[in-house]
Image (cartoon, grey):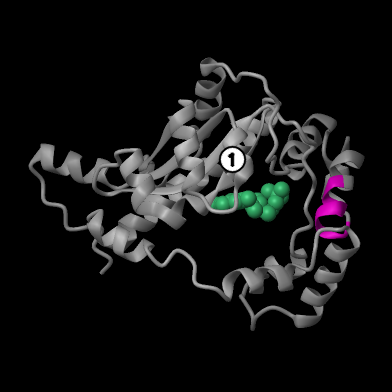
């Protein structure tokens, strides 16, 4: 099984990792479930039972949480009209309409504030760091949700595009103050094989002892060549094109209206 794991890692990073060969097959199998991840954006016309959605969400909520604060929640959207409305608020994602379930992962800083109010205690920590705590909890939960879905034989794709019309999404889901929609997650039975997308080389993203002075342009150019050879497009060209246009400028104003003090 280490060959399978190493095969996946080679596709992902362009080289094998020696430690993969030292693992027991069962351990390599478990890691292969992570290393072989691929987002799925096409879904079979097959219902996903409520109980299975509940199960993968429970596994996602088993993720670690900063200070055990658990500042994250998931809104499960199954109703067809509501899913269509949500999909209509996310530009450029026609495939989202066909997802049988859309989950919205929210950071929930309101949970802690309400607890302090009920306890009659002061809360001198309603600052930007609480927003970071809540969003981090939602992000970690999203990662575990994706892994849980994959491991259960389901598939899915995160959708941060819900933040492009954040006010409308918040209104549709009736989000209370201090709750921020971090990302959607389209969930269903895969109707396409998940592809292993090449990631930046470990030599670029894994730093020893010190961060160093920035990305090596030669390593990025080599990564771009590898992605093009795999038919995955030039990463630098795609990402610079995406982020040279204004995106999600409503987010700062939304956060202030939702009650976050960003000081
Ligand atoms: C927080 C987050 C938000 C994402 N938002 C979107 C999105 O709005 N639309 C989309 O098509 N994919 C979205 N994705 C999926 C990424 O595009 C995908 O993970 C990336 O291209 C790598 O592909 P892979 O997941 O198949 O390895 C998102 C992923 C994450 C983690």
Give residue 152's position: percent from left, percent from top: 67, 25
> What residue is rendered at 57% in x and 37% in y?
97
Give residue 182's position: percent from left, percent from top: 44, 49
Residue in the foreground of this view, choosing between 98 and 202:
98
Q: Residues within 10 Å of mark 1 (few under 14, many from 20)?
A: many
Residue position for label 1: 96
Decide if residue 237 is in sight here: yes
Viewer-nearest residue: 210 or 170: 170
Vertically, is 232 above or below 97?
Answer: below
Chain part drawn in magenta: 8-15
- Nearer the observer, 125 or 87: 87
Judge whether residue 9 is colored magenta: yes
Q: Which residue occupies 52% across, 34% down?
A: 102
Left or right, residue 125 beside residue 121 = right
189 relative position to 66: left or right: right
State whether residue 15 is above or below residue 21. Answer: below
**Quarter of the image holding residue 29?**
top right
Residue 101 located left or right of residue 125: right
Query: Where is residue 26 drawn, in percent x and y?
Result: 80, 29
Q: Horizontal placement of 249 versus 11: left or right?
A: left
Q: Position of residue 156 (x, y in %)?
A: 64, 37
Residue 78 visible in the displayed image = no
What's the magenta bit mostly, secondary-structure-wise?
A: helix
């Amino acid at each position: 099984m280490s060959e399978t794991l190493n095969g996946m890692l080679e596709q992902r990073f362009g080289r094998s990792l020696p430690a993969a060969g030292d693992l027991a097959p069962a351990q390599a199998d478990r890691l292969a479930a992570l290393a072989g991840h691929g987002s799925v954006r096409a879904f079979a016309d097959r219902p996903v039972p409520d109980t299975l959605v509940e199960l993968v969400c429970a596994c996602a909520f088993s993720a670690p949480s900063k200070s055990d604060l658990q500042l994250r929640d998931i809104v499960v959207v199954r109703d067809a009209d509501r899913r269509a409305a949500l999909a209509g608020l996310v530009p450029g994602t026609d495939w989202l309409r066909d997802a049988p379930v859309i989950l919205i992962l929210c950071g929930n800083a309101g949970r802690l504030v309400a607890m302090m109010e009920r306890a009659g205690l002061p809360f001198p920590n309603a600052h930007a760091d609480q927003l970071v705590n809540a969003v981090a909890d939602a992000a970690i939960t999203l990662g575990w949700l994706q892994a849980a879905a994959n491991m259960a034989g389901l598939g899915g794709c995160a959708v941060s595009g819900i933040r492009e019309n954040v006010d409308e999404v918040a209104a549709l889901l009736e989000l209370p103050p201090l709750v921020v929609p971090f990302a959607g997650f389209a969930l269903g039975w895969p109707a396409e094989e998940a592809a292993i997308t090449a990631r930046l080389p470990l030599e670029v993203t894994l730093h020893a002892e010190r961060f160093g002075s920035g990305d090596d342009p030669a390593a990025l150019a080599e990564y771009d060549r590898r992605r093009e050879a795999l038919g995955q497009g030039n990463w630098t060209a795609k990402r610079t094109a995406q982020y040279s246009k204004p995106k999600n400028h409503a987010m700062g104003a939304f956060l202030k209206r939702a009650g976050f003090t960003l000081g």
